Image: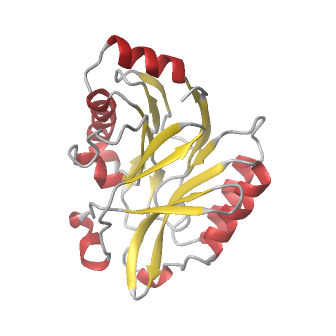
C-alpha cells in the first residue's frame, strides 16, 4: 500500500420508493465533481430507501440500479459502492454492490439483519465478510447494523479501511458516531460511515452524520444534517506510521 485513496460520498435524502428520482439526484451530485475519486460511496438502499414493506421492489443483478452504477463507474472512472434490495434464486438480500469502471461487480450480503425492522424475517443474511482491494488498499465492506457487532469486523484479515453504509435513524445517532470511532480505534483502520438524511416512508428521521474517521478515532470530517457530496484523501503514509508507532494489532 503506497498510494493515497481519494474517496467521495453522497449523503442524501433518499426519495421513498422512487428509483428514478434518486438516480437522477445522484447524477446531479456526481456532475459537480472536479476530480476523479478512486471510490464513490452511496448510502444503504440508495435507490429506494429502506422500504421492507415492499419487497417486490427488489432488483436482479441485471436491474436498472446496477446498470446505472456500471454506467457511472465507466463514465467517471471510479469504483462506485452502495446497497440495494436484491432478489436472487427466490431469496432476498440487502446487497452492498462494489462496481468497478470496467464493469466488474463484487458484492457483500448484509450479515446482521435489523430485527427491530423485521429485516430478518424477509431477507437472507450473508455468511462471509468481504474484503476488496483498491489501489493497494484492503477495504472491508459493511452495512448499517453490522456496526454494532465488533467481532464481525475484527481486523484479522489485514484490512486498512472499514466502510459502513447505512440508514441509521436520528434517535440513535449518538451510537452511530461513537461506534464508528470505536471500530476505527480497535482495528487501527480508517473508517467511513455513509448515512442518509431526512424522513423515510415510515416517518423515521435521519440526521446524516456521515464521516471520515482516522485510525486513532479522530473525526477528520463529518457531514451536518443536510444533503451533500463530501471528499477526502486517505493517507497511506499516516496509516503506516500510526500502525508502526502503536503496534496494537
Residue found 52% across the figure and 37% down from its top = 137
Q: Position of residue 116 (x, y in %)?
A: 21, 64
Q: In which image quadrant can residue 50 be found?
A: bottom left
Q: Report how many numbered discs are placed on residues in the image.
A: 0
Quadrant where the C terminus sits is top left
The relative height of residue 61 versus residue 12 in the rendered view (above or below) is below
Residue found 20% across the figure and 45% down from its top = 151
Q: Nearer the viewer, residue 83 or 61?
A: 61
Residue found 61% across the figure and 77% down from its top = 63
Q: Nearer the viewer, residue 75 or 55?
A: 75
Is 91 displayed left or right of 30 in the figure?
A: left
Q: In which image quadrant can residue 34 be found?
A: top right
The relative height of residue 142 versus residue 21 in the rendered view (above or below) is above
Q: Position of residue 83 (x, y in %)?
A: 49, 61
Q: Residue lying farthest bottom?
A: 90
Residue found 60% across the figure and 27% down from its top = 4
Q: In which image quadrant can residue 101 be found?
A: bottom right
Is 98 displayed left or right of 178 in the figure?
A: right
The relative height of residue 56 versus residue 134 in the rendered view (above or below) is below
Amino acid at each position: 500500500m503506497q498510494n493515497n485513496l481519494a474517496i467521495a460520498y453522497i449523503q442524501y435524502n433518499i426519495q421513498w420508493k422512487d428509483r428514478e428520482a434518486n438516480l437522477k439526484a445522484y447524477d446531479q451530485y456526481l456532475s459537480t465533481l472536479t476530480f476523479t475519486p478512486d471510490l464513490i460511496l452511496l448510502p444503504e438502499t440508495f435507490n429506494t430507501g429502506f422500504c421492507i414493506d415492499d419487497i417486490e421492489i427488489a432488483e436482479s443483478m441485471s436491474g436498472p440500479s446496477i446498470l446505472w452504477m456500471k454506467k457511472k463507474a465507466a463514465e467517471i472512472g471510479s469504483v462506485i459502492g452502495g446497497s440495494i434490495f436484491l432478489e436472487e434464486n427466490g431469496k432476498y438480500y440487502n446487497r452492498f454492490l462494489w462496481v468497478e469502471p470496467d464493469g466488474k461487480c463484487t458484492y457483500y450480503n448484509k450479515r446482521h439483519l435489523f430485527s427491530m425492522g423485521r429485516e430478518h424475517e424477509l431477507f437472507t443474511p450473508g455468511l462471509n465478510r468481504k474484503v476488496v482491494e483498491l489501489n493497494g488498499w484492503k477495504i472491508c465492506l459493511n452495512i448499517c447494523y453490522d456496526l454494532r457487532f465488533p467481532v464481525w469486523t475484527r481486523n484479522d484479515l489485514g484490512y486498512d479501511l472499514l466502510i459502513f453504509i447505512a440508514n441509521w435513524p436520528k434517535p440513535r445517532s449518538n451510537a452511530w458516531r461513537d461506534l464508528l470511532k470505536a471500530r476505527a480505534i480497535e482495528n487501527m483502520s480508517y473508517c467511513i460511515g455513509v448515512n442518509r438524511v431526512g424522513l423515510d416512508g415510515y416517518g423515521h428521521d435521519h440526521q446524516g452524520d456521515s464521516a471520515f474517521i482516522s485510525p486513532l478515532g479522530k473525526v477528520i470530517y463529518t457531514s451536518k444534517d443536510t444533503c451533500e457530496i463530501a471528499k477526502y484523501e486517505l493517507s497511506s503514509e499516516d496509516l503506516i506510521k500510526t500502525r508502526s508507532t502503536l503496534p496494537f494489532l
